[in-house]
Image (spheres, coloured by chain):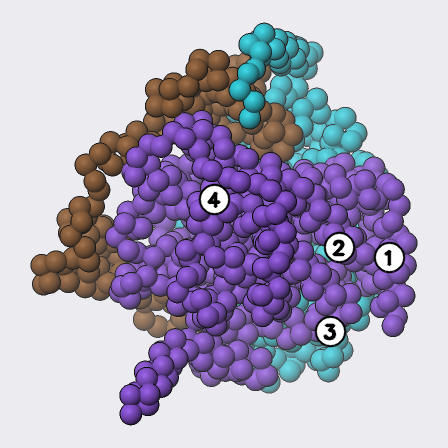
Amino acid sequence: MRKADVITALIILIIGIFVVYDGVRLGVIGWGASGPMSGLYPFLLGMGLIIGSLVVMGRVFISRKSMSDKPFIQKGGLRHVLYVAVPAALMVALTEFIGLYVAAGLYLALYMKWIGKHRWITVLAVSILLPLISYFVFDKYFLIPLPKGRLSGLLGF
Amino acid sequence: MESLNNLMMGFGVFFTPYNIFVAVIGIFLGTIVGVLPGLGGANGVAILIPVTFMMPPTSAIILLACIYWGALFGGVITSILFNIPGEPWSVATCFDGYPMAKKGKAPQALTAAFSSHFIGAVFATVALTFLAPLIAEIALRFGPPETFSIMMLTFSAFVALGGKSPIKTLIAIFLGFAMAAVGIDIVSGKLRLTFGTTELMGGFHFIVAVIGLFGIGEILITVEEGLKMDSLPVKMSLRAMLETWKELPRYWKTLLRGAIIGCWMGFKPGGATPASFMSYGFAKQFSKDSEKFGTGIMEGVVAPEVAAHAAGVSAMVPMITLGIPGSPTAAVMLGGLMIWGLQPGPMLFKEHPEFVWGLIASIWASNAIGVIIVLAFVPLFAAILRVPFGILMPSIVFICAIGAYAVNTRMIDIWYMIIFGFVGYTFKKLDYPIAPMVLALVLGDMAETAMRQALIMGQGSPLIFFRPPFALPIMILAFIIFFWPTVSRWKQKAVKKRCKI
Amino acid sequence: MKKVFSGFKITLGLVCSFVLLSLSTVVAIAWEPTKPVEFVVPAGTGGGADIMARFISPLIEKHKLSPQPFIVVNKSGGAGAEGFLHVKGKKGDPHIITLTLDNLFTTPLATGVPFNWRDLTPVSRLALDWFVLWVNAESPYKTAKEYIEAVKAKPSVFKMGGTGAAQEDQIITLQMEQAFGLKFIYVPYKGGGDVAVSLVGKHSDSTVNNPAEGVSHWKAGRLRALAVVDRERINLPDWDKIPTMKEATGFDMSYHMLRGIFMPPGVSKEVQEWYIELFRKVTETPEWKKYVSDSALKSAFLTGSAYVKWLEEKEGLTKDLMKKGGLIK
């Protein structure tokens, strides 16, 4: 838990520095034609993030004991989380190339077969029908074209 | 009494078989649109505008308005079942609705939510029928300083929702504000926090963040405890529904407060979301079961929902009377009005009374029809939870991805969703509260703009934030609410002391 | 969800949909869109450009002007920069068009986004929007002259409400300040509707709203129109009673807002021609004519080299005004 706390605080610190940097670029002090300079607000927010994250880190080091001594993630837990996270991220990555419908179909099938251990008939039915229904609902009915990646133009859509 | 006569005329306009048919279709489509995250009432309305060319204007607006009501109803469903808010104003419903569903009380939560919607709608419709011109006049008096004071009130109502660590609550709020600041700064016209990238120019859309933080984050939290492939036990019976109704009158104070907040906030653009947050915050602060909020109690579902729907209805007031839309959906409807050859604004009441009163009558009737339809579907919605997890989970991820994309039709938003999922997961584990961050993200932009507009108007003098007659009392109220928890704790201590003596 | 699905039905459904899809791609004689056209609006939902796009796209369908639907997509990020860069990036894509306002010029100038209208293929100008100087009907100023005298007497007191910063409303405000030696407090709002309401609610002392944004309040007797920012009066009933800037104040001022169609760079001449013809037909429909007069737009269809020339002039004028007003260096 302590490590996770410090790492998260570090990331927030970095975000804070970025925000302050952009605030300074836009100008912090002064009164422009449009009231307070547009950088003032990000500057203050960024400073808040920097100070806050430093306090969190400081507290971890000083008290030598963070909020809880439980590990951030249980041993078996990490594997389960990755089982969900990795295929989802892969689906998104694939979407860039083969479009959301096909990527989602593969993702659904893979997940249901590999982790859900469902029968092939169920797997095929859901992984084909759900994207197909979504295609008609979004692309055809609501006219919101979902990403089709490189497949765009092929198959007529 | 003139209003009553007009209303009767309006009912005469509404009650034709064709219009009732149109209303049912509208509610139905609206509910679907509301259920799918990322697809809002605005999309539904925009898509159907071409269809309305063939209709008389009154039927057309009834259809569009019913889609809007349906979307208001539908937004709740995914919040309660999957912790994914379909619409921004359903976020606060997640806080108690989802824990209720986890306990197997999804039907109760849905029934409570739909019923409070109806109560909110009735309350707001009464206000709309008799007080529309008055409300419009008050709305006009609300300039940037007043808007800012309302924002302060919302934040102070929500301060009690922080986590255990005040410093982490502050960090979460600052992060939310910082995300809200990404993109164009409308006061100076400059790009902020985009670091020269196109991807950041559009900023972070609230829905995308919420789908990730709540929806994906929750899935990660759930699976960590083990991949349970079985489904949630859901007992659905008419009894559950009746029990819920029996319990509802107990929350009359929360209902009334929420309805008033909703009516009052709804006439400002984007009012439904702050209204639902504010109602939830107030309910928590003033409730006897304050500590139980967030663990899945009915009062926590009732409070935001009654306010959201009341605000949704009262958002029609500025649209009809002033020609300014109170919500994005109303904005698209305004476009529709113009296409049908009606000029929205103050003259609409005089030039087309049959249209305006037909619309108002349709709000009465269609909300009644709506609540019956959605209540009839409660068992079906609850049954979704019986789908095995191995099928449900990837399907939810897929629908979430569609939702995130549909908001802005940008690929990058799907990535943001995944990233926000991890953020939500990490934050929950490390005790960074997500609710204040989300509130800051929703309202940060509005609050900052109002503050800076007010400062420009006042030439830098902060006194403008306290100008009578509206900003001053709201600000004072905000301060009182802000310090309420401290005061009440202090009072409790004093009482204890006296008891000892 | 039911567990048993017949595999045969799925296959049949798939085959059917493929057949249907391939039918829609039958080769046409001249160029025609073969898939839905993305109609990018570089502004938010409910604004002037959005309403126009959402008006045009069903109109095209109603009159069967295109074999494929036009799908409105809002990309409002960065004052429209997101939308412009999106279209710019779709080089050679014949299935994407955009409807722009003056932010075509002002946004890149004010934000420094690497974009210029020359990066796009101009299709046609559809209409121009007027600007009117409005005050609250309860204010004592009956003419533009009276109002300007009052502002002159008390610099930095009168509040001018407008849409956004470094955009057309502020440009006109600056133009007025320079012409008459005034100083307003310019308060930016998010959209034209908000601006009009701020004037009705007396949070602003005046605005330069477009006619469509102020019309309903005007007809309800809550706003007063003082002058049109143009050389000629608006050629529509009721509107023609508003004097021009020159008539009212003696100073010649003219500013219009563009509503024009553009395509990505590198599209073929054939494609460009098809869209020009399409929008010519759109502007000839009776619905369009009614829409234009209802929202008090100046019907001004223009295309080809005349359009390009107009754009060049307009860009120069905008740049010049923004420079003079100190909005850009």
Q: Where is B368 relative to A117, above or below?
A: below
Which residue is denoted by mark 1 in the rendering? B10
Residue bearing the label numbered 4: B104
Chain assignment, label 1: B
Residue designated by label 3: B134
Q: In front: C7, or B19? A: C7
Whole-number angstrom distance, CA of label 3 to CA of label 2: 19 Å
* Residue B363 circle label: 2
| Chain B representation colour | purple
Nearer-N-terminus badge (3/1): 1
Residue B469, visible in the rendered structure:
yes
| Upstream in sequence: badge 3 or badge 2 | 3
- Residue at 49% x, 79% y is B477
Image colour assigned to chain C = cyan
In the foreground, B315 or C173: B315
- Answer few, some or many: residues within 10 Å of disc 4's Cα (few below 14, many 20 plus, some between 14 and 19): some
Residue at 60% over, 42% down: B237
